[in-house]
Amino acid sequence: MTPQEKLNQHRGSIDNLDAALINIMAERFRVTKAVGVLKAENDFPPSDPDREKRQVERLRKLATDANLDPDFAEKLLNFVISEVIQHHKQARK
């Protein structure tokens, strides 16, 4: 296999992984939207700092176990959590 063919193969794998990530995130947001509606209907607060802290700790361990930078994983989760909280706030309107 030539270097260009190897590069194309790696890029194809990256493209497939990106598609999987997008589909997983879409499913995650479908579920968190349902959570937001449930919270709004039952007057629960949009955020749960204790759960968020546990989730960060859990994700950092998962990242470490997977040989992924836990700081990166935490930044990613914090971004996702902030988006989810915004959706939950919107569900209250």
Image (cartoon, grey):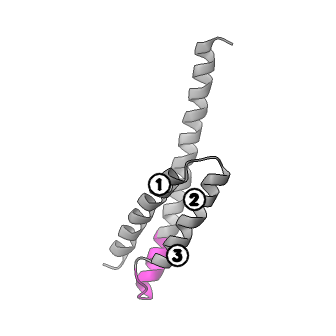
Question: Which residue occupies 42% across, 76% down?
Answer: 47
- Which one is in front in this view, the residue at disc 3 or the one at disc 2? 2
Residue, disc 2: 60
For this orientation, the residue located farthest to the top is 2
Sooner in the amino-acid sequence: mark 1 or mark 3: 3
> Measuring 54% from the left and 42% from the top, which residue is drawn there?
19
Residue identified by numbered label 1: 76
Give coordinates of residue 67: x percent, y percent: 64, 46
Q: Nearer the viewer, residue 1 or 28?
A: 1
Q: State whether the magenta stretch is mostly helix, strand or loop.
A: helix
Q: Which residues are magenta?
A: 33-45
**Disc 1 secondary structure class:** helix
Q: Amino acid under label 3?
A: Arg
The answer to if 40 sits in the magenta stretch is yes
Which residue is denoted by mark 3 in the rendering? 51
**CA separation, marks 1 and 2?**
11 Å
Quadrant in which the C terminus is drawn: bottom left
- C-alpha span from label 1 to label 3: 16 Å
